[in-house]
Amino acid sequence: MKYVQLDKQEVIPSKIVCVGRNYVEHIQELNNTIPDEMVIFVKPNSAISSQLQSFHGEALHYETELCFMYQAGRFSAVAVGLDLTKRELQSQLKQKGLPWEKSKAFNGSALFSDFISIDEIDASLSFSLSIDNEQIQVGDIGLMIHSPQAILAHILSFMSLEDGDIVMTGTPKGVGKVKPESHYCAKAMLNGETLITREWIAKDE
């Protein structure tokens, strides 16, 4: 089983629950429509990795997201993560009306910074991704269609969460292909101050 770091403790999530299409400008950049209901999909524990891949059967795309850990009935910790996507395969599956998991839930498709404990979800939480020192993605809670609190309530309305499970809350505009050998730096911020940073060098094919 794969683990993540919580304040220097190893935590093993049973699953990762992800929200799709939660930022209007990201929906527009992929020529999708704003859904009537929250879009939810799941990645297994085996998706967790510390190595950023650029290829897995096809070129991979990065999506930077604000992530929360579930414990004792609430979101107890925050991190920044990457949801890796097989965009070409995802497009093919969507055209056929099929589930996304083959393009989203493969091994190595979820990467995270360390998780930092929080007492509550502050509205000032934000995040960013820079590639080779150029800022590419920026997001915050205010830009989300569905807030973290609404996401948690919706998930719990039909699915149980185990302590340590992770919820990824969607990506803003600026997604693209993972560039081999490039330097990726993701940050989560609170009131404009850096809360946590995670860096990766993308692995070549």
Image (cartoon, rainbow, N blue to C red):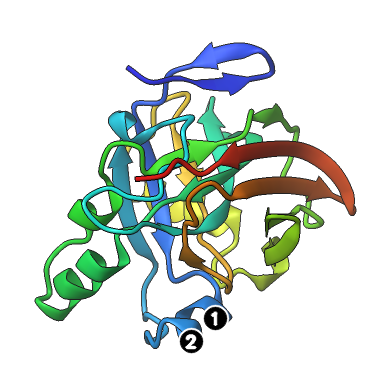
Q: Is residue 158 visible?
A: no
Q: Residue at x 42, y 41 (%)?
A: 110
Query: How far is mark 1 from mark 2, CA to CA?
Result: 6 Å
Q: Secondary structure at mark 2?
A: helix
Asked if residue 39 is positioned above or below residue 114 in the image, the reply reads below
Residue 201 x/y as whole percent? 57, 40
Question: Which residue position is annotated with label 1?
Answer: 24
Q: Which mark is residue 68?
A: none
Compared with 174, 192 (above or below) is: above
Give the answer, above or below, for where 2 lies relative to 61: above
Image-based side of 123 in relation to 114, left or right: right
Give how far across and how far down residue 145 sits, in percent. Answer: 56, 73
- Residue type at mark 2? Gln
Q: Position of residue 112 (x, y in %)?
A: 55, 36
Q: Give the answer, above or below, for where 147 lies relative to 36.
A: above
Quadrant location of the N terminus in the rendered image = top left
Q: Nearer the viewer, residue 141 or 44?
A: 44
Of tags 1 and 2, the one toward the viewer is: 2
**Residue at image mark 2:** 28
- Quadrant housing residue 58: bottom left
Q: State left or right for residue 63 relative to residue 139.
A: left
- Residue at 36% x, 73% y: name it: 37
The kind of residue tagged 1 is: Val
Q: Quadrant of residue 86?
A: bottom left
Asked whether disc 1 touches disc 2, contact meaning CB atoms under 8 Å apart, the reply is: yes
| Residue at x 41%, y 44% (from the top left corner) | 204
Are there few (<14), some (14-19), or many (20+) residues within 10 Å of tag 1? some
**Can residue 92 be seen by looking at this rendering?**
yes
Nearest the eye: 76 or 112? 112
State the residue at coordinates (37%, 81%). Answer: 36
